[in-house]
Image: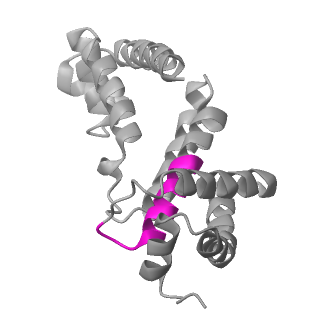
Amino acid sequence: MLERDDEHLYALVRKGNEQAFKYFFMKYQPKLFVFCYSITGEEEIAKDLAQETFITFWEKRDTIITDYAVTAYLFKIGHGKCRDYLKRNNLKSNFSDLTEFQLSELELNYYEEEKDILDSLYYKEINNAYEKAIGKLPAQCRAVYNMSHKEELKSSEIASKLSLSLRTVENHLYRATKFIRDEMKRYALFLF
């Protein structure tokens, strides 16, 4: 009879023992399904993603080298599958969906071992594209945008600090926001 210790079980799976993999699947599929469902909110999608995760795990069983629990690696694969699903289906090509995606990304990163949002490669890519878009703005427009969004100053405060009219500040903010949205749409479409 199989020893139920995960490391021993994985050693058997790694050798291609289908009975051990079946036990591993039966033991962790419900937990993985709940994990995927909590992220996607869709039962059928969660079932598919959990299934894909186990398929990937099986296919890579002899190349997986991990310094932490095998189950953590399984859930890391599941995390990647969920993230890919969210990228394809939540972000699409509409920048307005970015906020919803970022919330989902934050939720996903809660389950990562590091629990550090900056470790998310995709988040870094989006943030870099955002910073590059800001960098392309004309100097005064960029200053107004940064004061509004990074320093969280009101338009009237910005106008006072830069000796500009309120209408000029609002025009800069409108143009900057429109430009950044356009830049991010192109970036999002390029990624997918």
Q: Main secondary structure of the magenta part?
A: helix
Residue 173 visible? The answer is: yes
Residue 160: name its quadrant: top left
Query: Can you say which quadrant of the picture contains the C terminus?
Result: top right
Q: Residue at x 33, y 64 (%)?
A: 66
Q: Residue at x 44, y 73 (%)?
A: 11
Determine if the magenta segment contains residue 18.
no
Determine if the magenta segment contains residue 76.
yes
Q: Is residue 94 above or below residue 81?
A: above
Query: Can you say which quadrant of the picture contains the N terminus?
Result: bottom right
Q: Nearer the viewer, residue 133 or 115?
A: 115
* Percent coordinates x, y for residue 39 in the rendering: 62, 57
Residue 41 visible? The answer is: no
Q: Residue at x 49, y 49 (%)?
A: 105
* Percent coordinates x, y for residue 151 in the rendering: 26, 39
* Percent coordinates x, y for residue 88 in the rendering: 62, 33
Residue 112: name its quadrant: bottom left
Q: Is residue 8 above or below residue 103?
A: below
Give the magenta part as a residue range: 67-82
